[in-house]
Amino acid sequence: MPSLFRSKDKREKEKEESADTHRPTSENAQNGGSNEALPAYSAQDTAASGPDDVAPSADVDLAAAFAKLSLPSTAADPDPDTCLAHLKLLFAIQSLKEDIGYTDGLWNIWDTRAEGTEVSLAEVQPEPPSEKERGNAVLSKIREKRWALFVARAVERYEAWWNSLPKDELRVTDMQAGADAKYDLFVHRDAQGFWTTGNMLPLDVLMVMHSHMLNPRDFLEDCIRNGLNSLWTSGMPWPLVHEAIDTDFNYNVSDDTKARWVAQTGRSWENTDDPLIKELKCPACRASLSVPWTTCGLDENDKTSSRPGLIGSGYGDGKFVYNCPSCSVQIDKEFLSVAKFVNDTTALLGYSAPMPGTVLEPTTGKPEPIPDGTKGAIWPRTFPNRMIERVLRIKIVELIGPGVTPRPTMFDVRQLVEDALGSNTTVRYIDGLVAYSSRISYRLSPVAKVSVRKMMSRYWDNFSPFALDLGGAVMRQGIFADKMHRIDWLHSPAARETMARLVRKYGRFVEIMAAHPARVCVPTLDVDLAWHTHQLSPRAYYKFTTEKTGKFVDHDDKIDEDKLSEAFEFTSKEYQDRYGEVYSECTCWYCETIRASHVSSVGKLLGVSSQERVAESFYASGTANLCPPDKSAHISAHNAVKTNETAARARITRQMRVYQQRRLEANYQKAVKRAAKKGRQLPPRAEYYDHWGYSYYMYSPFVYPLYFTPGLYYAGDPGFVQGGAGAWANCAAGSCGNGGVAAGACGGPGGCGSPGGCGSSSGGCAGSGGGCGGGGGGGCGGGGGGCGGGGGGGGCGGGGGC
């Protein structure tokens, strides 16, 4: 299988080849819902080679093509030119990733450590067939470690920039009806003009902001809480991004821009030029500490038998730990998460700053004002604020102090919340109903329960000031960038026609979400490019989705792999029923299997199956011949996660998972027979993904990324969520309840731990991470997205490791 990572020589060879590009005009997303048949992808669309193939069969003059881009100066709905500019940014990020991963010796992490090192791979991975391949497997983990550390530093640099911006922080009183335009009118104010050539960001920081914006509700919440209206309204500055990236995908800005960045943030322009020491305050005693970014470095010529491994205990490593010399408290990531919770509680008590997760209405994702009077006093969304103010305030503040032993974790916070929710008397007191008889049971609103989970989700495996762990988000988005790089529409002579087509297809996708607000809809890769591009103009995306669906449609950052496959099957069938065209224009075994699942035996027998006709026209038209399995836009594959279940939960969900697997197998056999009758043969099921030079076996396009390494990543393993009552990062008992939140699967950080709760496809709550609140539809993901964890991939570290 071709490598996703080109050698320097091959990249240079590709850069030298050029030709003209034809670029006709097209419609934008507003017209995407038409029932008129979309033009088929042409041979030119798929002619561009993958990253390690020979040069494109029809060369493209990128300089001439890019010169013709017409990009809006203000945030707007996606069009072909904006999608091309987005692809250009993804290519620049991919090039940056390659440069970092392949820089031997960066942070004293040398390739020579692969020699003689044992490698542990995921259970489904076959043993490397030779010593050379074994070495390549270790090298892939070494290169991944460099990139993971780089991403950790990039997130911290983004945080430094974010903290340097002038803010007008939100207060609870601002959310009252008619109180202040900075809350309910935030999404409607036209505060453009945030970006200039002088305040452009380094590429690594821009990459983090890109991932932040691709979690639309989280980005909106963070911007509202900090009063960053101009940033949210302006979105991604496409003309400036386009200008900064050349045809070799190098990112260039002026020296004045670099100097302004350094003066504003105190950080170097280049990530790798920043110090290897991280300065922070002890959360317990406020002493200044200097901690290493990584403890994984080792001199190239070091011959000692003891090696530090690739997990490490530095701030940017997988198992950060540091003992404060002043108060002796042990600081680790769990402790930092609690410190964040305590700080936010202090801000709530001190100057009425609402807790994260209580700013947007969970059912709509909108900033909806709190009504006046008695109704507002028990408004469900703000229940977490009242719970802390009236019951938990002292217990939370006292969690952290100099030398505290044992150090608190989010388990302790969850226990406090569970104790409060478990007492009907306490819940009534929180909502000011003490005058009523204690014998009358008071049922907490489902929306209040969802709001508790959303609040808690902001802290599990997340000690940043943001609503989610941006390090994990960057890793998952990297999967999508890899796939765009591999399909390589950017070098196709028909690139603009392709973009016009996928923008219209995206419009249809939104129509399906609007028609099925309680279902998760999963995009194909082409649809997802347009969807992502739209989200990078937050104000335009907000206006579009709220008008079309009545909700601010979220983009699920994590979704269980089994739920993903089930939702993709639904989306595919619905699309083909509505528009009479194949949804996933791909000929891989999985897409053939999904199409076979749509055809009923009775309908086929009677010759009245519309799905059969759609599938056959895909081949009869010749379109299928232009959609090879390794270069086609099938299921979007960047944020599937695996659910680590407790034993109790696994007993409940195992039967359902087995049923799903058997059903998929039966449909595959149906697809094989159908293809044989037509004289076709399905491609092999075995797929391999080249990750940093080693080919990892992938048993399906929708699975979580088996090639990532558990424990390597500084916040948490972004390819996993937890499932089962009492498990790490699951919700507090008493906070289960969907509350009308469409697509709000609740697994992962802040997710629901009770078996059978909240409506996951696998019998519990193992859907999107980040609590509940999916928001009207959009699950997006597939065989990529995170790393390791229990039951997953193999690690590389510890004593005697790398």
Image: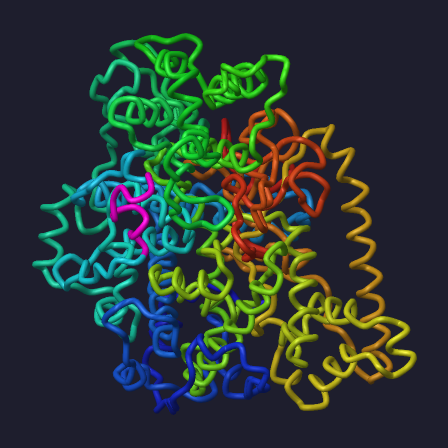
Taking depth in this image into account, of 169 and 779 the one nearest to the observer is 169
Say if 612 sits above or below 227 in the image.
Answer: below
Taking depth in this image into account, of 529 and 677 the one nearest to the observer is 529
The type of colouring in the image is: rainbow
| Side (left or right) of 32 relative to 628 | left
Type of secondary structure dominating the magenta stretch: loop
Q: Is residue 184 magenta?
A: yes
Taking depth in this image into account, of 269 and 576 the one nearest to the observer is 576
Count of numbered tags? 0
Q: Which residues are drawn in magenta?
A: 176-187
Q: For the N terminus, give its image quadrant.
A: bottom right
Quadrant of the image occupied by residue 592:
bottom right
Say if 27 sits above or below 558 in the image.
Answer: below
User: Which residue sits at x=37%, y=86%?
Assistant: 60
Q: Position of residue 24 (x, y in %)?
A: 39, 91
Say if 38 sits above or below 410 in the image.
Answer: below
Quadrant of the image occupied by residue 524:
bottom right
Q: Position of residue 177 (x, y in %)?
A: 33, 42
Q: Position of residue 181 (x, y in %)?
A: 25, 48
Taking depth in this image into account, of 267 and 111 the one nearest to the observer is 267
Work out whether residue 802 can be spotted.
no
Q: Position of residue 456 (x, y in %)?
A: 47, 31
Work out whether residue 527 can be spotted.
yes
| Side (left or right) of 209 relative to 165 | right
Q: Is residue 192 magenta?
A: no
| Side (left or right) of 513 relative to 8 | right
Quadrant of the image occupied by residue 777:
bottom right
